[in-house]
Image (spheres, rainbow, N blue to C red):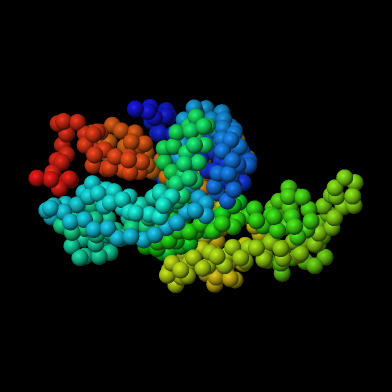
């Protein structure tokens, strides 16, 4: 059994690993107070082996992971071995499915009944080469009584549920796991990045009211739609900040690193917000004359591509059927959310209220990190990394609660989805429960 990393306050230390297209970020943290996260260390490395959220070069990705892990480990004084990994990419798909479970009696519904329904969802036949990443329960129906969010403790014989199922390519998932293995790490959980980002920048009120999370990364733009506290729709759009940089590089005939700096320092998503006579001077190559670029022309290039990305997002919103139920509007986050005037462009195209989502509301006051690093963590750029931490901490706390209730001391890894798929939940559960426990097989397995 793996020994958990503990702090003086006996709060488990959790590590998030965000494998992005432009950066690989490692965050180390723990729970501090009721709803706050204390960041102990951050490591960042350039991501040269990832393209549009998918690993394209394993060795380069491994080197970047090792560099980020070393930096975060040195800063936090933690020996990092187990990580919660984010996954994204255009191969990600989502489907809706309905499951039904008929129980042998109408006693109280337990957590294990819900696990049985979830296990059934993992048996769905998917197209060749695809694997289920997440099975997310939505509303339950108990004995024809619909709209139940949490059925645990209710009496009922027939239990139905709608599920939001997220799948990805087996090869892409295996490549991520291979990179983790080669970096001498272990995957604790694989988490869809928009789900992680939503934990960092949205609260329960947002999710209840109806909100669209748009995470604009380097290679992809991730979309997650919530309504009445439940995730309703997810999508990954294969366009992000890098393609804007490429447009600037070609449109302005400059080097790629110059194009990136132009985007960050002078970029705007609305050309009309810039003056005609503003000009940027870019150094020429090998003694050539410097190049003059109009700030307004730069904005036109950026606006054209951002309009395309927002149109894709708006299509996903309309496809979900929740366009008129989004009281919370649109929340944009990720590195691309730092682009000037992007909020106004989103509101102009979609007609929906928009704001930038910052992860700072979940961060506890920090005396461990230098002030400049702590302030940098409040940027939308770190929403996914902090969200992965929050998801990992939630999983640890749920496991601790389970251990306390059942008296079964297991690591979180023992009850990951891998266990469900490889062994089946009930075979796994019977293997770990020893004689003399308080759980009755018959009530959960439906046997006489």
Q: Nearer the viewer, residue 118 or 174?
A: 174
Among the 4 quarters of the image, the one containing residue 138: bottom left
Q: Residue 34 vs residue 350: left or right?
A: left
Instruction: Report if residue 54 is visible in the image.
Output: yes
In what quadrant of the picture does the C terminus appear? top left
Q: In the orientation shown, which residue stands out farthest toward the front?
A: 128
At which x and y percent is residue 444? 17, 45
| Residue visible at 20% across and 65% down in the picture | 144
Q: In the orientation shown, which residue stands out farthest toward the left?
A: 448
| Residue visible at 55% across and 70% down in the picture | 350
Give the number of marks: 0
| Residue visible at 47% across and 39% down in the picture | 177
In what quadrant of the picture does the N terminus appear? top left
Instruction: Report if residue 15 is visible in the image.
Output: no
Asked if 191 appears above or below 183 in the picture, the reply is below
Q: Nearer the viewer, residue 297 or 61?
A: 61
Q: Nearer the viewer, residue 65 or 71?
A: 65
Asked if 176 appears above or below 194 in the picture, the reply is above
Q: Residue 104 vs residue 186: left or right?
A: left
At which x and y percent is residue 255? 77, 50
| Residue visible at 40% across and 34% down in the picture | 11
At which x and y percent is residue 169? 46, 49
Asked if 96 appears above or below 55 in the picture, the reply is below
At which x and y percent is residue 65? 56, 36
């Amino acid at each position: 059994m793996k020994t958990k990393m503990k702090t003086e306050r006996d709060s488990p230390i959790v590590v998030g690993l965000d494998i992005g297209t432009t950066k690989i970020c490692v965050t180390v943290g723990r729970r501090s107070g009721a709803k706050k996260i204390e960041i102990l260390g951050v490591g960042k490395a350039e991501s040269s082996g990832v393209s549009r959220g998918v690993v394209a070069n394993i060795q380069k990705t491994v080197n970047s992971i090792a560099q980020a892990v070393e930096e975060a480990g040195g800063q936090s004084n933690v020996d990092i071995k187990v990580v919660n990994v984010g996954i994204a990419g255009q191969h990600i798909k989502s489907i809706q499915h309905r499951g039904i479970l008929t129980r042998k009696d109408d006693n109280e519904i337990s957590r294990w009944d819900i696990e049985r329904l979830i296990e059934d969802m993992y048996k769905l036949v998917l197209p060749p080469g695809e694997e289920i990443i997440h099975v997310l329960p939505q509303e339950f129906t108990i004995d024809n009584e619909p709209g139940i969010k949490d059925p645990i403790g209710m009496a009922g014989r027939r239990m139905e549920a709608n599920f939001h199922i997220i799948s990805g390519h087996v090869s892409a998932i295996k490549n991520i796991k291979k990179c983790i293995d080669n970096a001498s790490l272990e995957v604790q959980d694989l988490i869809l990045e928009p789900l992680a980002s939503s934990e960092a920048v949205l609260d329960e009120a947002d999710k209840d009211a109806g909100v669209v999370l748009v995470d604009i990364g380097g290679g992809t733009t991730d979309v997650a739609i919530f309504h009445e506290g439940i995730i309703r729709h997810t999508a990954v759009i294969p366009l992000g900040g890098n393609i804007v940089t490429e447009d600037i590089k070609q449109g302005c005939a400059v080097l790629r690193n110059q194009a990136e700096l132009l985007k960050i320092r002078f970029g705007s998503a609305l050309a009309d917000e810039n003056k005609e006579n503003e000009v940027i001077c870019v150094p020429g190559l090998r003694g050539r004359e410097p190049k003059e670029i109009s700030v307004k022309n730069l904005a036109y290039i950026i606006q054209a591509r951002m309009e395309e990305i927002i149109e894709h997002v708006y299509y996903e919103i309309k496809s979900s059927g929740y366009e008129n139920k989004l009281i919370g509007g649109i929340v944009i986050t990720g590195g691309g959310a730092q682009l000037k005037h992007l909020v106004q462009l989103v509101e102009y195209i979609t007609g929906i209220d928009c704001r930038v989502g910052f992860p700072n509301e979940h961060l506890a006051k920090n005396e461990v990190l230098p002030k400049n690093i702590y302030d940098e963590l409040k940027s939308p750029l770190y929403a996914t990394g902090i969200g992965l931490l929050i998801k990992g901490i939630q999983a640890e706390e749920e496991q601790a609660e389970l251990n306390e209730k059942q008296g079964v001391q297991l690591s979180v890894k023992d009850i990951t989805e891998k266990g469900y798929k490889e062994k089946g939940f009930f075979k796994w559960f019977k293997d770990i429960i020893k004689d003399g426990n308080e759980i009755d097989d018959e009530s959960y397995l439906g046997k006489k």
